[in-house]
């Protein structure tokens, strides 16, 4: 599943699996096929943004940085981090 979130006048793809997985740290061996499918979606979105904007970044948060306690990836572009 891929959702788009509008933040700071940018459209940021938000990629989340249908199965609840609390974070990348809780993935189990039985999640391998789901993870491959999830990363394939991340790859397609990242490829599209890179071709449109010249660069992009993929991010997932853990622990206190994780607002939503469900594994998800953000794929976004913009100014480089400093």
Image (spheres, helix red, strand yellow):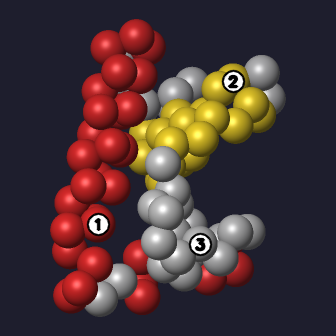
Q: CA distance from mark 2 to mark 3?
A: 22 Å
Q: Residue at x 49, y 78 (%)?
A: 21
**Tag 3 or tag 1, which sits nearer the N-term?**
1
Q: Residue at x 51, y 43 (%)?
A: 2
Relative side of 75 to 30, left or right: right
Q: Is residue 81 visible?
A: no
**Tag 3 or tag 2, which sits nearer the N-term?**
2
Q: Residue at x 69, y 24 (%)?
A: 10
Question: In front of the other: label 1 or label 3?
Answer: 1
Q: CA distance from mark 1 to mark 3?
A: 14 Å
Image-quadrant location for residue 42 = top left
Q: Is residue 16 visible?
A: yes
- The x and y percentages for residue 44 are 30, 33
Circle 2 sits on which residue?
10
Q: CA distance from mark 1 to mark 2?
A: 28 Å
Residue 70 - label: 3
- The x and y percentages for residue 13 are 55, 37
Q: Residue at x 73, y 69 (%)?
A: 67
Residue 34 - label: 1
Element under disc 2 = strand
28 or 47, nearer to the observer: 28
Mark 1 Cα shell of 10 Å, populated few (<14), some (14-19), many (≥20): some
Element under disc 1 = helix
Question: In front of the other: label 1 or label 2?
Answer: 1
- The x and y percentages for residue 47 are 29, 27
**Tag 2 or tag 1, which sits nearer the N-term?**
2
Relative side of 19 to 47, left or right: right
When the figure is inspected, residue 72 is found, relative to residue 9, above or below; the finding is: below
């Amino acid at each position: 599943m891929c959702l788009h979130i509008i933040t700071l006048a940018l459209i940021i793809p938000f990629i989340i699996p249908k199965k609840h997985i609390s974070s990348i740290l809780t993935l189990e061996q039985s999640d391998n096929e789901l993870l491959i499918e999830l990363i394939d979606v991340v790859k397609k979105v990242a490829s599209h943004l890179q071709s449109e904007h010249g660069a992009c970044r993929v991010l997932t948060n853990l622990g206190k940085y994780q607002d939503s306690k469900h594994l998800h990836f953000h794929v976004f572009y913009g100014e480089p981090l400093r």
